Image: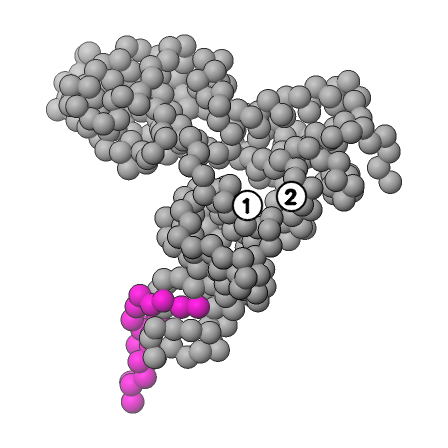
């Protein structure tokens, strides 16, 4: 997350979210009554005498709204907020009318409130630190899959098809054009502290890496080739993240830390250990005791529990310095957490009975 301005009282945070984890931090900070300022589009309809109203013109405008409704959309990677307009850069827009804003990745937003709490400032500063990102490329002669891991979130992009036919068929498509398209797509998501893994079932992966080197592309020095993955495309990305060699390569990632913590918790469950807890009801109760050391929550929990209740729980855990991992259910570790109801916590001390 890029932080342009941060002040405790009166509370001001000007930020640009860069990942799903950043959106979740903002969702936890936003409260009704906050003032949200951002660029947006609004339809302006002109009244015409004796004619039908026109469809209106969409204009770019900077608006401030007093927050009344908040919801996060994990699929579309945005927070949707709405409320009454308090400030506008366009005189044709009435103050006091309602408007909805989308807080999206890569777009700056200003949050103003009476005061930023200490834990909220800590959350923002933690997200402001640059974290490692991993691009997973799974490639063969026919297709390439791209996965981007930021924090604990996995985003898998549509496959890139080569158009190159087999030996028995003639085609105008070449591996060079296929590789150029793949390089362009990688460049669109590349950034600082990005590590790139290229893998796949054939030697096309090394041919591609050599091609990148010949073209003197900046990404070449970031690439590591790893063998052992038998699929290309999107399926190959999911397979790669389960492979021991890829796990070792990503051992310092937040996703790896969450995976290790989840494995420890599941092992404790199998041993009937009292330093683990795994239902929303029970986790909520031990959170109030300050007993949670680490909690892993999958996206499934938001299908089962009201969003505001989950946010309240996260804030409770944060106040006692518990470590929070929010995980995508599409990842292997996310599926493990789904299997126990979408939430699992490691405890600082044994809790023998939760009333």
Q: Give the answer, above or below, for where 201 lies relative to 97.
A: above
Query: Is residue 147 among what the camera can see?
Result: no
Q: Quadrant of residue 172?
A: top left
Q: Give the answer, above or below, for where 174 lies relative to 43.
A: above
Is label 2 in contact with label 1 (beta carbons under 8 Å)?
A: yes
255 in the magenta segment: no
Judging from the image, what secondary structure is the residue with disc 2 in?
helix
Q: Please name the residue that numbered disc 2 is placed on.
A: 318
Q: Which mark is residue 58?
A: none
Q: Say which of 126 and 151 sits in front.
A: 126
Q: Give the answer, above or below, for where 339 lies relative to 166.
A: below
For the point 48% across and 42% down, the residue is: 127
Q: Please name the residue that numbered disc 1 is placed on.
A: 123
Query: Is residue 41 among what the camera can see?
Result: yes
Tell me the magenta residue range: 43-64
For the point 63% across and 21% down, the residue is: 263
Which quadrant would the N terminus be assigned to in this image?
top left
Q: Is residue 204 left or right of residue 14?
A: left
């Amino acid at each position: 997350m890029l932080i342009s301005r941060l002040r405790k009282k009166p509370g001001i945070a000007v930020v640009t979210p860069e990942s799903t984890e950043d959106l979740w931090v903002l969702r936890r900070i936003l409260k009704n009554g906050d003032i949200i300022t951002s660029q947006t589009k609004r339809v302006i309809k002109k009244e015409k005498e004796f004619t039908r109203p026109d469809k209106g013109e969409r204009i770019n405008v900077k608006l401030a709204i007093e927050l009344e409704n908040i919801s996060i959309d994990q699929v579309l990677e945005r927070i949707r907020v709405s409320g009454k307009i308090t400030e506008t850069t366009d005189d044709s827009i009435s103050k006091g009318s309602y408007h909805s804003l989308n807080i999206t990745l890569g777009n700056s937003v200003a949050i103003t409130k009476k005061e930023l709490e200490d834990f909220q400032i800590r959350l923002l500063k933690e997200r402001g630190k640059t974290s490692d990102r991993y691009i997973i490329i799974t490639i063969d002669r026919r297709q390439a899959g791209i996965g981007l891991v930021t924090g604990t979130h996995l985003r898998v992009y549509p496959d890139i098809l080569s158009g190159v036919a087999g030996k028995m068929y003639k085609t105008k498509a070449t591996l060079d054009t296929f590789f150029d398209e793949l390089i362009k797509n990688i460049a669109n998501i590349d950034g600082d502290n990005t590590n790139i893994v290229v893998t796949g079932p054939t030697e096309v992966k090394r041919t591609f890496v050599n091609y990148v080197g010949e073209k003197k592309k900046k990404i070449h020095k970031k690439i590591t080739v790893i063998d052992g993955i038998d699929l290309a495309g999107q399926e190959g990305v999911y397979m790669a993240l389960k492979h021991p060699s890829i796990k070792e390569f990503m051992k310092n990632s937040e996703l790896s830390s969450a995976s290790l913590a989840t494995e420890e918790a599941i092992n404790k469950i199998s041993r009937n250990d009292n330093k683990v807890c795994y239902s929303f009801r029970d986790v909520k109760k031990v959170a109030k005791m300050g007993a949670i050391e680490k909690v892993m929550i999958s996206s499934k929990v938001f299908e089962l529990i009201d969003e505001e209740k989950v946010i309240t729980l996260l804030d409770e855990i944060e106040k006692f310095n518990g470590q929070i991992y929010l995980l995508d259910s599409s990842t292997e570790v996310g599926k493990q957490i789904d299997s126990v109801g979408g939430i699992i916590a490691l405890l600082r001390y044994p809790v023998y009975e939760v009333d």
